[in-house]
Image (cartoon, rainbow, N blue to C red):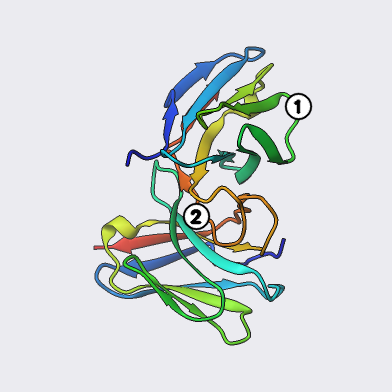
Amino acid sequence: KAGVTQTPRYLIKTRGQQVTLSCSPISGHRSVSWYQQTPGQGLQFLFEYFSETQRNKGNFPGRFSGRQFSNSRSEMNVSTLELGDSALYLCASSPLGSGGSTDTQYFGPGTRLTVL
Amino acid sequence: DAKTTQPNSMESNEEEPVHLPCNHSTISGTDYIHWYRQLPSQGPEYVIHGLTSNVNNRMASLAIAEDRKSSTLILHRATLRDAAVYYCILRGYGGATNKLIFGTGTLLAVQP
């Protein structure tokens, strides 16, 4: 099976612009989560989708949003970009989807976003 | 969510065993202990998880203290490809979420 794929892999934007990142989960996985990784804050949970519904959200401003499509592919959008949004954005999918203490997360390689 | 504490960094020599410790003194009875690792320029990858008993898989072993307040990830023969940041994460039972709470992890350096 192909792994989690994320596009684009690298992106450069300027302050005030918006950006959309895409994630394709492993075939058959219905749960998709997004994380932001920065040198200062480490890996932080953004949000999680299951069956096109957001079921959990991290502590990020409303400029960060996401959605999931019927084929489980997911997108996240960041509007009005700030310099501090420069980060590696990681997507993860899960096989069970029901959540819980034993589910394994499979991560993609990430999208490196640079905001100038 | 209960918190974990790990050393910031550790060093090992190639082909020697590595023991990566994790303290989780506030763990609840139903929390599972998960380990993920992140190799340079990659997303995290699952390593192993357990509840009470020691666990083995092809990547590593997980030794869990009897009181469950600490655990140790064991790499039996470190290779250069094992150089990564290792994260110890607690996951509570129930709740329909796959959210992972990452700490700062342990940066493992492997010397040839």
- Protein chain holding label 1: A
Q: Residue at x 62, y 22 (%)?
A: A77
Does residue A106 appear left or right of residue B13 in this picture? right
Q: Residue at x 61, y 80 (%)?
A: B68
Both marks 2 and 1 on one chain: yes
Q: Which residue is mark 1?
A: A62
Residue B6 lies in quadrant: bottom right
Residue A45 image offset from top left, x and y in percent:
64, 43
Residue B65 image offset from top left, x and y in percent:
56, 84
Q: Which mark is residue A104?
A: 2
Q: Residue at x 42, y 39 (%)?
A: A26
Query: If the image is split into quadrants, where does the N terminus of chain B sit?
Result: bottom right
Residue B6 visible in the shown view: no
Q: Residue at x 50, y 25 (%)?
A: A22
Type of residue at label 1? Gly
Label 1 secondary element: loop
Indicate whether B88 appears above or below B43: below
Residue B93 visible in the shown view: yes
Residue B39 image offset from top left, x and y in percent:
39, 50
Mark 2, other Cα within 10 Å: few <14 / some 14–19 / many ≥20: many
Indicate whether A49 appears above or below B39: above
- Protein chain holding label 2: A
Type of residue at label 2? Thr
